[in-house]
């Protein structure tokens, strides 16, 4: 194992049953990401990018191969321990925001802080929301916010615990170009400030170029490093 | 259409199956009893027409009968003690004339457990026919001699079926039948004795009608004409009441089923909004959409109702087993009518509670494919409330067949629902204030409830109704039945000693001490006859009421008492003070006063032996007659009747095993008569227990319906909950945190629903006990606690059962 790798995948294969027989979504993908690195995973829609991201974060289990995150082999542990590996150390930004609809903006941001028992959760969450420009929307529910604002809340939530690694799955996919551009800027700014490792899935080459390194997926296989 | 998750549809099937089963079981049982009564009409009377009177048939009547060429036979019935050696037993004695029964057949057997056959004729003179129970209670055999009044009789045969007796359940004491020609020699019929005379008549319908007219014109006092259409009126009334009461219990199941269906339909529609938009996109018309979804619902509803019918038929057979002997002979086969009604009621409930929601699907615009917020279901669909209330009204009218009752039930349900909704809304507002003060995991629960106070209110009301039904039907009903049953505690007196003379009192008390029995309450009796009210002399024919006529015809028992017995309650006026110990006052039992239209201050003139006495009504009492202690319609102050001829009466409890002690008493005091009411007590207890089992079965359905509602309500939020769990997992929540989070939501919801349900159950329970059963209702704080506890447990258990699978599912499967 690469000594300073924060996450590492070995011969990852993901297959799902389908009406036409077994469908192979990922086929023997191996890769490794260093601490502090920013990596773009690019490829056409349906190439398996989201699936790879889900596996790297331990949100799903591979059919074959293994993922080592923060030094833990995720295939050796159960669902509960995989959650523990993520707690406070992994942040997420999704294409469709995934905020809890029953909680206000600030309560959503407080969530990861409180789950890991951090003190002064409310104060930290407030300053997080201020950082993403939503100081005056803290008491709003997700349904009362626009898409761009919801994604800002999601970014504040992702950075709330100062995670070592951040996974982002097409964070601009549901936003218009202008809003999307601002969101990406915010993401990169925060990433630089906090020195976080970033794995960003996108089908937008422009965005990919802003990362240190790019990997291209095609039909579940890695095409190799692009430069 | 293929279903990904069919939970809502299962709710629809289960809800209808439960409600229809309840309805069909009650209807089938009642229908079989009613048809039995109808088929057996004339047999139940043993005649085509019966003239019932409190005195023997007049010779003019019998002359007219023979002139018209009709058949007739007389019977005389009364209660009396039958003795065999040292054993004595209260029996329902019936003296019959040759020709009895004119319709139907009396069946007798040569001995116990022998095959029976139709009797030819009536008991020969000097013999009696008795039912098996009397032989057992008297410890005797066929062929033995028993004593009735002053005469001895040989037990000749065992009666196995008596057409005009009614169901065995309603008999107060076992039967003894003798030849009417033997009656005078028993010396049991004296002026004023409580005998009931029947003149049975049979013949051609038109001739019978001629006689009926003739009788009607004579307008005799104290005479009732009965024919097949009004045979066994008391049983018919009881049956009707019972049917109505159980009908209401099934209506609660129907209402609950409706609530569950409504929730399920909403869920179902919600899940299919996208499908419908897509179908519209690819060219499906509104009609196509309706056809697809309505057909699906109707097919399922019919399936659920058919299951319910099957279960209902099986259950009514259980009722037949639990309550045998309601009618003499076998019950007719179940008919198809209840199934037809059950099926239609099922479909009506389904349509009434679900159709307006399903109809909404028709209006989903194809544009929803692009803009998902279009065509969403509104929070409240007014049409649902309207159609469900109309459906409920229709069902009440149909099942309860009573407009007043229907409006009460409807009004009650509406008020309850509005009350529950207001209360839930308030509670949610209150609780949401508290969300800042609690930890992260508890916050989900409260936040989830508070976010949409409207839909949470709906859910809590649905849960609350479920909780209310369960509470009402288990706890409150338990309270009520307990109250009813404790009116007959284990040591209820099972023997009455009557005719004790004043000079025997001290000896009797000594005897009781020697046997270590509790000190007897010896009650004096003076026989008195009512001759005038407020100075106006009274005749039986002055009153319409049959009870009033009887009271005036016969001598009344006056007793006296220093203070009020515990089973008596003052309802008007004042009890006498010490200085009134000899004042001419009287305390009158409530029903007695009602029958004779008496009020406080009225003056009653009685004749006692050859003296007259006038007393003023100083108070009215309610009496718990079923305490099995000596009780009296009329009480006077303790010193008023000093010097009048009195005898004494007492009751006591003697276990069966020590009955010989009583024989010793009778030997020592031969003039004292011992009346054994043990068999009667057993009978009453058995009846209570069996009625209880039938109620329990019906209530079980209601409880099941309540559980379906709970399930449906929890199902509604399942989608949101899956999403939440996946997000929390992504953020690293452990199983412990997840479970606390989920449990907190269910606990909060359970507490609210339980509290709301408990309030509703107590109000309803109060109304039922106070107005329907007239049993005092005790408010139990325990009911609250158990209610809330049960609600929390059930809601949490159901919620966890529905979500725990998700705790082990990789979150990606849900988030994708
Ligand atoms: N659980 C699953 N069941 C069936 N098919 C799946 C599943 N997960 C992913 N797929 C399929 O695998 C392919 C890759 O999906 P995904 O990783 O979401 O692609 P990308 O994110 O690159 O667009 C798609 O064709 C998708 O439909
Ligand atoms: Mg994707």
Image (cartoon, coloured by chain):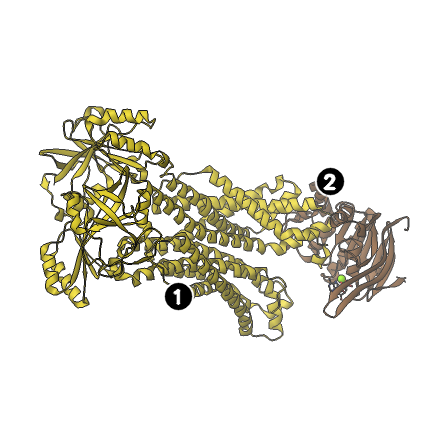
Chain colours: A brown, B yellow
Q: In this rendering, would B466 be left or right of B728?
A: left
Residue B87, x across and y down, in percent:
29, 38
Q: Position of residue B368 (x, y in %)?
A: 62, 67
The residue drawn where x is 38% and y is 52% is: B323
Q: Is circle 1 on the same chain as circle 2?
A: no
> Mark 1 belongs to which subunit?
B
Ligand 2 within 8 Å of the CB at mark 2: no
Q: Is residue B668 left or right of residue B466?
A: left
Front one among B527 and B91 = B91
Q: Which mark is residue A118?
A: 2
Q: Residue at x 67, y 53 (%)?
A: B806
Looking at the rendering, the quadrant in which ligand 2 lies is: bottom right
- Quarter in which the N terminus of chain B is drawn: bottom right
Q: Dot 1: what SS?
A: helix
Tally of marks: 2
For this rendering, which residue is in front, B743 or B57? B57
Residue, disc 1: B337
């Amino acid at each position: 194992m690469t000594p300073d790798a924060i996450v590492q995948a070995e011969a990852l294969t993901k297959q799902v049953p389908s009406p036409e027989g077994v469908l192979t979504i990922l086929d023997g993908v191996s890769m490794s990401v260093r601490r502090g690195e920013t990596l773009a995973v690019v490829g056409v829609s349906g190439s398996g990018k989201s699936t790879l991201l889900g596996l790297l974060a331990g949100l799903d289990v591979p059919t074959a191969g293994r993922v080592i995150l923060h030094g833990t082999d995720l295939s050796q542990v159960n669902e509960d321990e995989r959650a523990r590996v993520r707690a406070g150390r992994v942040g997420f930004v999704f294409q469709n925001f995934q905020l809890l609809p029953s909680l206000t903006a600030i309560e959503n941001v407080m969530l990861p802080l409180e789950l890991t028992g951090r003190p002064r959760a409310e104060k930290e969450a407030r300053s997080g929301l201020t950082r993403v420009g939503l100081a005056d929307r803290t008491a709003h529910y997700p349904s009362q916010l626009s898409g761009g604002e919801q994604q800002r809340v999601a970014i504040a939530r992702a950075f709330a615990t100062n995670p070592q690694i951040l996974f982002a799955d097409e964070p601009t996919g549901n936003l218009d170009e202008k809003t999307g551009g601002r969101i990406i800027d915010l993401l990169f700014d925060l990433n630089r400030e906090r020195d976080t490792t970033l794995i960003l899935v996108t089908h937008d080459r422009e965005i990919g170029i802003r990362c240190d390194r790019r990997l291209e997926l095609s039909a579940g296989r890695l095409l190799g490093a692009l430069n | 259409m293929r279903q990904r998750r069919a939970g809502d549809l299962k709710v629809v099937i289960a809800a209808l199956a439960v409600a229809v089963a309840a309805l069909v079981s009650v209807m089938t049982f009642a229908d079989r009893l009613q048809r039995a009564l109808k088929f057996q009409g004339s047999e139940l009377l043993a005649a085509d027409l019966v003239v019932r009177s409190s005195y023997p048939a007049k010779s003019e009547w019998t002359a007219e009968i023979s002139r018209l060429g009709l058949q007739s036979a007389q019977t005389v019935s009364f209660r009396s003690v039958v003795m065999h050696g040292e054993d004595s037993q209260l029996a329902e004695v019936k003296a019959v004339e040759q020709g009895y029964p004119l319709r139907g057949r009396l069946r007798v057997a040569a001995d116990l457990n022998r095959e029976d056959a139709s009797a030819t004729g009536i008991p020969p003179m000097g013999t009696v026919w008795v039912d098996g129970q009397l032989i057992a209670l008297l410890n005797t055999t066929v062929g033995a001699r028993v004593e009735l009044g002053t005469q001895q009789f040989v037990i000749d045969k065992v009666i196995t079926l008596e057409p005009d007796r009614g169901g065995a359940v309603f008999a107060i004491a076992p039967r003894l039948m003798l030849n009417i020609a033997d009656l005078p020699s028993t010396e049991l019929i004296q002026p004023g004795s409580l005998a009931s005379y029947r003149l049975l008549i049979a013949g051609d319908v038109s001739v019978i009608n001629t006689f009926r007219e003739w009788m009607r014109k004579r307008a005799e006092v104290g005479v009732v004409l009965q024919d097949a259409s009004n045979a066994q009126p008391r049983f018919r009334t009881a049956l009707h009441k019972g049917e109505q009461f159980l009908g209401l219990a099934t209506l609660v199941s129907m209402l609950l089923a409706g609530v569950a269906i409504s929730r399920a339909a909403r869920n179902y529609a919600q899940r299919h909004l996208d499908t419908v938009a897509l179908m519209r996109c690819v060219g499906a018309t509104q009609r196509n959409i309706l056809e697809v979804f309505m057909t699906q619902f109707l097919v399922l509803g019919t399936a659920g109702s058919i299951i319910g019918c099957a279960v209902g038929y099986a259950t009514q057979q259980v009722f037949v087993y639990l309550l045998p002997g309601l009618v003499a002979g076998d019950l007719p086969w179940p008919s198809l009518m209840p199934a037809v009604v059950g099926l239609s009621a099922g479909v009506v409930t389904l349509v009434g509670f679900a159709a307006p929601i399903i109809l909404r699907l028709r209006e989903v615009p194809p544009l929803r494919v692009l803009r998902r917020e279009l065509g969403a279901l509104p929070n409240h669909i007014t049409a649902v409330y309207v159609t469900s209330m109309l459906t409920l009204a229709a069902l009440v009218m149909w099942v309860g067949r009573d407009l007043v009752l229907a409006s009460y039930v409807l009004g009650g349900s509406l008020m309850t629902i509005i009350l529950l909704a207001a209360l839930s809304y308030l509670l949610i507002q209150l609780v949401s204030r508290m969300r800042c003060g609690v930890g992260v995991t508890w916050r989900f629960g409260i936040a989830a409830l508070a976010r949409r106070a409207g839909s949470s209110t709906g859910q809590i009301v649905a849960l609350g109704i479920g909780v209310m039904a369960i509470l009402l039907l288990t706890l409150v009903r338990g309270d009520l039945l307990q109250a009813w049953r404790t009116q007959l505690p284990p040591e209820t007196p099972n023997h009455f000693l009557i005719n004790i003379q004043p000079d025997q009192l001290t000896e009797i008390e000594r005897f009781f001490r020697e046997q270590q029995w509790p000190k007897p309450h010896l009650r004096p009796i003076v026989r008195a006859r009512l001759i005038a009210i407020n100075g106006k002399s009274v005749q039986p024919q002055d009153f319409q009421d049959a009870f009033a006529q009887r009271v005036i015809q016969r001598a009344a028992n006056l007793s006296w008492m220093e203070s009020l017995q515990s089973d008596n309650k003052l309802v008007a006026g004042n009890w006498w003070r010490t200085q009134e110990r000899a004042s001419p006052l009287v305390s009158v039992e409530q029903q007695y006063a009602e029958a004779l239209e008496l009020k406080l201050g009225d003056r009653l003139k009685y004749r006692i032996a050859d003296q007259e006495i006038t007393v003023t009504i100083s108070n009215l009492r309610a009496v718990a007659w079923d305490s099995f202690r000596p009780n009296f319609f009329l009480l006077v102050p303790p010193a008023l009747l000093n010097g009048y001829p009195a005898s004494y009466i007492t009751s006591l409890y003697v276990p069966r095993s020590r009955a010989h002690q009583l024989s010793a008493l009778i030997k020592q005091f031969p003039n004292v008569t011992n009346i054994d009411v043990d068999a009667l007590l057993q009978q009453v207890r058995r009846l209570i227990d069996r009625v209880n089992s039938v109620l329990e079965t019906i209530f079980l359905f209601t409880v099941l319906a309540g559980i379906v509602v709970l399930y449906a309500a929890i199902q509604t939020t399942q989608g949101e909950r899956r999403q939440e769990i996946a997000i929390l997992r992504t953020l690293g929540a452990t199983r412990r945190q997840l479970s606390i989070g989920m449990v907190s939501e269910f606990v909060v919801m359970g507490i609210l629903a339980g509290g709301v349900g408990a309030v509703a159950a107590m109000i309803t329970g109060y109304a039922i006990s106070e107005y329907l059963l007239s049993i005092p209702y005790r408010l139990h704080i325990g009911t609250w606690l158990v209610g809330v506890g049960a609600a929390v447990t059930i809601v949490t258990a159901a919620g966890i059962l529905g979500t725990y699978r998700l705790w082990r599912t990789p979150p990606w499967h849900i988030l994708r």
